[in-house]
Image: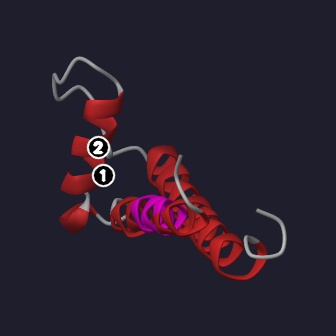
Amino acid sequence: MASKKTHKAWLKFTAIVIGLFGPVFFFGTMQSTSEAARLTMDLLGWPIDGAQDFEAPTTRFLSALTGGFLMGWGATVWFLSTWVYNKAP
């Protein structure tokens, strides 16, 4: 059975993974840096066919919102693992 230390480590790892997608989608709002977000959306919308289009302003707006939500979610998981987990595992 995993220990509390292992659980906290996995929570922090998960927080970092979630949080790293924030900048990917934030940079997807700019044409010159949108390739990583386009590739991520292509992977999530299987099959990988290059059909995702980041030209539409609504897609860029959604990408900006998604980046902010993911960064905030990653920070929330990190802070929960740091400050709350010891009091309520």
What type is the residue that disc 1 sits on? Ala
Which picture quadrant has residue 13? bottom left
Task: Identify the secondary structure beneath mark 2.
Answer: helix
Residue closest to the far front: 1
Q: Residues within 10 Å of mark 1 (few under 14, many from 20)?
A: many
Q: Which residues are magenta?
A: 10-19
Q: Which residue is mark 1?
A: 37
Mark 2–mark 1 contact, CB under 8 Å?
Answer: yes
Q: Position of residue 5 (x, y in %)?
A: 54, 70
Quarter in which the C terminus is drawn: bottom right
Of 38 and 59, nearer the camera is: 38
Q: Which residue is mark 2?
A: 40
Q: Main secondary structure of the magenta part?
A: helix
56 vs 27: above or below: above
User: Which residue is at a point 56% across and 66% down the rendered structure image?
Assistant: 74
65 relative to 10 in the view: left or right: right
Q: Is residue 16 magenta?
A: yes
Which picture quadrant has residue 16? bottom left
Q: Position of residue 58 (x, y in %)?
A: 52, 46
User: Which residue is at a point 46% across and 50% down the rendered structure image?
Assistant: 57
Residue closest to the far right: 88
Task: Identify the secondary structure beneath mark 1.
Answer: helix
Q: Residues within 10 Å of mark 2 (few under 14, many from 20)?
A: some
Of 20 and 86, nearer the camera is: 86
Task: Identify the disc placed on residue 82.
Answer: none
Q: Position of residue 27 (x, y in %)?
A: 34, 67
Which picture quadrant has residue 84? bottom right
Q: Is residue 89 magenta?
A: no
77 relative to 55 in the view: left or right: right
What type is the residue that disc 2 sits on? Thr
